[in-house]
Amino acid sequence: MRLGAIEAGGTKMVCGIGDETGRIEERASFPTTTPEETVAAMLGFFRGKAIEALGIGSFGPVELNRNSPAYGSITTTPKLAWANFNLLQAMQRELGVPVGFDTDVNAAALGEATFGAAAGLDSCVYMTIGTGIGAGVVAEGKLLHGLLHPEMGHILVKRHPEDRYEGKCPYHADCLEGMAAGPAIEARWGRKGAELADDARVWEMEAYYLAQAVVNLVLILSPKKIILGGGVMHQRHMFPLVRQITLDMLKGYVQRDEITGGIDSYIVPPGLGDKAGLVGSLLLAKGAAL
Ligand code: ADP
Ligand code: ZN
């Protein structure tokens, strides 16, 4: 089945053509400027490619309620040109194919649960730590939605005892995203994360916040695998730190061998690398086509 996919991000839109096996045969990326310009560029890419369906994993918040007239819109984004823009309808109207739509992180979670680090499992969480923090959830074999959709980047965290940084979230200041996303690292330490690789204090503090998120995920959702992706997790040396602090904070309360025995394969990087979102969006397309 020939499928189209869009990983819709606040900086760029990654578009791909592929199939339901997750194979991507062509990919292109367009800067996220105005909806008019960006949509025109994406339509240019997909036209004439004979796709049977399209899947979109989008930055948000997004409207996922199929009964709402706004289904398929980006809602209250700080990127004002995109606020209330209906990306699903704009693409569907012009391409005339079924369109599957979900959050970017749910798409990535679906990709990972199907072909990636959580393949064969009926539950996992995919959390991205990049410009923002967000998480997608597969629970009992299905993507989790709910009232809006999970917004786990904004959960509340305990402050590291040595952290004097006020926090970067425009809504909550010192929520998880405000303390631990890439821009928070840069604001706290005065340099980009990639340039701080050798400073142990940076990553110990970062891991302290991420481990709190992991602990809460374990306790609330009981996922069978937790996948940590996004630019900040390119600091691979953080994985052992996050795992250790998670164990310290859980204090043996959750007695499952996956955690107490084999946490190295419980908290892991994405199996699909940076393709998780696009592969997941192909699967959203497949779901829409059926
Ligand atoms: P986005 O979240 O915008 O989709 P990324 O996942 O690449 O994009 O995240 C970008 C953020 O990750 C930036 O804040 C950047 O500073 C940070 N980042 C990128 N690479 C690294 C790295 N190697 N080490 C630490 N931080 C990084
Ligand atoms: Zn917040």
Image (tube, rainbow, N blue to C red):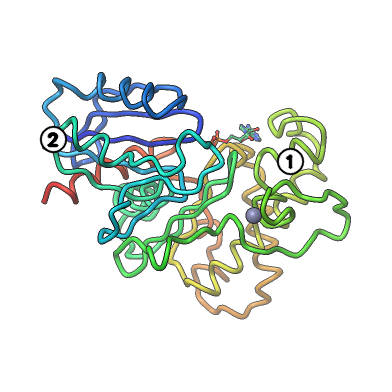
Which residue is tagged 1?
Answer: 185
Is residue 130 or residue 88 the one in the foreground?
Answer: 88
- Secondary structure of the residue carrying tag 1 is helix
Disc 2 and disc 1: Cα gap in Å? Answer: 43 Å
**Ligand 1 within 8 A of label 1's CB?**
yes
Choose the circle earlier in sequence order: 2 or 1: 2
**Please, is residue 257 above or below residue 279 in the view?**
below
In the image, residue 63 lies at what x, y percent? Answer: 37, 54
Q: Residue at x 44, y 38 (%)?
A: 273
69 vs 245, left or right, is left
Q: Quadrant of ligand 2?
A: bottom right
Q: Residue at x 65, y 67 (%)?
A: 247
In the image, residue 227 lies at what x, y percent? Answer: 49, 53
**Please, is residue 89 above or below residue 246 in the view?**
above
Corner quadrant of residue 17: top left
Q: Amino acid at mark 1?
A: Ile
Q: Are marks 2 and 1 in contact (CB under 8 Å)?
A: no
Count neighbours of disc 2 (C-alpha within 10 A) and say few if under 14, some if 14 to 19, many if 20 or more: few
Q: Amino acid at mark 2?
A: Gly
Corner quadrant of residue 248: bottom right
Count neighbours of disc 1 (C-alpha within 10 A) and say few if under 14, some if 14 to 19, many if 20 or more: many
Q: Residue at x 13, y 35 (%)?
A: 96
Which residue is tagged 2?
Answer: 96
175 vs 229, left or right, is right
In the image, residue 102 lies at what x, y percent? Answer: 34, 50
- Secondary structure of the residue carrying tag 2 is loop
225 vs 201, left or right, is left
Is residue 93 or residue 135 the one in the foreground?
Answer: 93
